[in-house]
Amino acid sequence: DAKTTQPTSMDCAEGRAANLPCNHSTISGNEYVYWYRQIHSQGPQYIIHGLKNNETNEMASLIITEDRKSSTLILPHATLRDTAVYYCIVRVWDGGYQKVTFGTGTKLQVIP
Amino acid sequence: DVKVTQSSRYLVKRTGEKVFLECVQDMDHENMFWYRQDPGLGLRLIYFSYDVKMKEKGDIPEGYSVSREKKERFSLILESASTNQTSMYLCASSGGGQGIDTQYFGPGTRLTVL
């Protein structure tokens, strides 16, 4: 799986959009970008994934650059409950059974 | 919504005890995984299973065994618990298909071995 680089930490004011960047310059053509988050002392929670088109669901939006070397997760109106560590991972599914490998992620602190 | 449940949120056991951690998923997923998560070491795969009665070793299987008798249930067994097995244990499941392999995680079991 391609390596990703994320900032260690970020702050965001409550109610504002949180934009979390991720660099994955070595991504290959069949690798998906996934985002998970982990709230303190809980299991990781799947947020969203994409291949090359921008994606949106009820939790977030995912913007992937045209060259696919980076992406941004957007939480449109951050709340205190969005305080968590956010992990960006890239992985390919080839029909096998692959583990998820998290890096250090970005610790997002939403400030009242 | 996919739901993955784990039998306990917190567990305290003594060294040498046999420990069972249970995981149940309700989405008819083929694949199930057991990880442990430790500060500074990230998420490490212990065992996974891609079908009933099938199991494969992950990166750190020593000291653990697993059982998958039914599709929805995947058990992690610590045959003789040791203090270095104190950790957060996470179960996950995935259904795969169509080039997508989203893993859904349970809430975790924080195990302390005294």
Image (tube, rainbow, N blue to C red):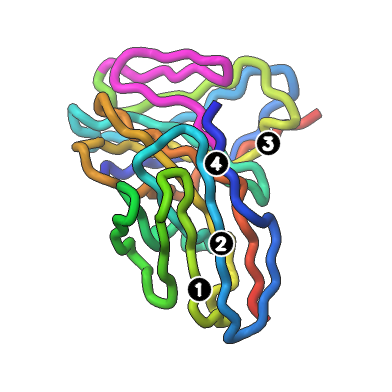
Callout 4 touching callout 1 (CB < 8 Å): no
Among the two numbered marks 2 and 4 on one chain, the one whose residue lies closer to the N terminus: 4
Is A47 part of what is drawn in magenta?
A: yes
Q: Amino acid at mark 2?
A: Leu
On what subunit does the disc labeled 1 rest?
Answer: B
Instruction: Answer few, some or many: residues within 10 Å of disc 3's Cα (few below 14, many 20 plus, some between 14 and 19).
Output: some
On what subunit does the disc labeled 2 rest?
Answer: B
Badges 3 and 2, same chain: no
Callout 2 touching callout 4 (CB < 8 Å): no
Q: Amino acid at mark 4?
A: Val
Instruction: Answer few, some or many: residues within 10 Å of disc 4's Cα (few below 14, many 20 plus, some between 14 and 19).
Output: many
Residue located beneath label 3 in the image: A83
How far from the left and from the top, in percent, is residue A54? Answer: 38, 13
Badges 4 and 1, same chain: yes
| Disc number for residue B104 | none
**Picture quadrant where residue A45 is located:** top right
